[in-house]
Image: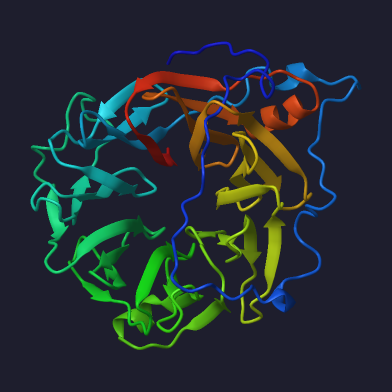
Amino acid sequence: MKRITLLIFMLLIPLLTSCNPTRRTLNASPTSLDTESITDSPLINTASMEIRTATVASIDCDSIQHQEDPAGMLLLTKINEGINVDIYLYDINNNHFRRVTENSSRDYMPAITSDGKRLVFISDRNHPRKNGLFFVEVNKTLDPSLTIENVNSLKELVVPTEFVVENPVWSFDNKWVAYVAVYENHSYIDVLNPDSGEGTRVKSNSIWNKYPTWAKDSNDLYILNENENNDYATLIQNISLKEIFENIYSHENILNQNIYGPAGLSLNQRSEILLTIDDQNTSGIYKILPGNSQEIIEVYKKEDEDAWGAIWSPDGEWIAFQVKEKEGNNTSIYIANEKTKEIFKVFTNSQVEAKSITWSPESKLLSYTRKEGKSTYYIDIISINAIIKNIEGCNYIPIEIGPIESNLLKMYSWIM
């Protein structure tokens, strides 16, 4: 691993390029968010919030001089030439990139089990311009020079016919895969057991069904729906595996509001949901409490910024997200502590595009990708303790992986 001592962290890291959240263009104007359902006590009081800065008090910086040593593997996709996309595993322990797929097709949207042994991914290798769902067993101890192209366990689980496949996700017990089946003008959520072949479609009354997200017990599935009458209205549906296979439409509606632009869901052990809400003026981060109360808590929203991409740490104690200033090019990464309600700026710059935030499995380390120039990427890894100490006046630099040459580098998960 190439480790480079950077100039003062948080102040003189190379400058970030503009990074905007994706927005859909709608024919109808969405109605405003029902503010009566939003609590008056947000998780973080953004109106009076001040980012913590360095203090003059004596600080024990030596206590975490080496941070926590990162370990495990990072799951990535990288564009190599033209539109060719391949999947890689980066071995943090041995400082080695292992190429998992190698062909002229597009292999992307990988999802790996928590034990790192089985992988599903989207590919058009058998059907040009049509994405199927593929499965392969991945042995982390194999010769790192091997790819999966000649492995007997490689098989196509879902053959695209009138639909294509997107966004596969494993249940936490590593038994089930949920994915999106996209048709020309609608989409559904399917559930499949790769071992037995057992599978079915989640019954829904909505035209568009997106972002399947498993509960930690692997018994319930959360789905973002769009109302068939208002293409800007959304509903978060919670349905059990038992109900899915009984083909019934009995479910718990977690959210039913006319809100615009949710970009994925993140769920913790308490079944608290993080999502992005965009009212066409400003996008912010919100938390939805479990149950039928439909209570929405504002996590972060400022009129002069857009915030998006929030994800829980695996232990449910931290929230990481991205923020971009509307005036200017500064893009930042923040973390918020669920218990203390404190917020810390991890990274900011105006000439670098920072994306793909990923937590380590034990929630002690944070990683993200940053793009410098047209095709040069780096991966930074830094501990939560170092982030906090840097705010207090220390100077712990991230561990840097790179440079990595690619037109697009995306990080999906961190496994041990």
Looking at the picture, the colour scheme in use is rainbow
Residue at position x 76%, y 70% in the image: 39
Q: Who is closer to the viewer here, 234 or 356?
A: 234
Q: Quadrant of the N terminus?
A: top left
Query: Outermost residue toward the right?
Result: 57
Instruction: Tell me if residue 289 comes above or below residue 406 in the rendering.
Output: below
Q: Is residue 312 left or right of residue 160?
A: right
Task: Please tell me in which quadrant of the rendered image residue 200 appears.
Answer: bottom left
Q: Quadrant of the C terminus?
A: top left
Percent coordinates x, y for residue 90 in the rendering:
36, 29
Task: Please tell me in which quadrant of the rendered image residue 403 appears.
Answer: top left
Instruction: Tell me if residue 283 comes above or below residue 71 in the rendering.
Output: below
Q: Who is closer to the viewer here, 388 or 326?
A: 326
Residue at position x 30%, y 63% in the image: 179
Q: Is residue 234 left or right of residue 394?
A: left
Residue at position x 14%, y 62% in the image: 160
Percent coordinates x, y for residue 42 in the rendering:
76, 61
- Judge whether residue 118 can be spotted in this image: no
Percent coordinates x, y for residue 260 in the rendering:
53, 67
Q: Is residue 48 left or right of residue 4?
A: right
Residue at position x 68%, y 30% in the image: 387
State the count of labels.
0
- Judge whether residue 260 can be spotted in this image: yes
Instruction: Tell me if residue 415 comes above or below residue 267 in the rendering.
Output: above
Percent coordinates x, y for residue 290 in the rendering:
61, 73
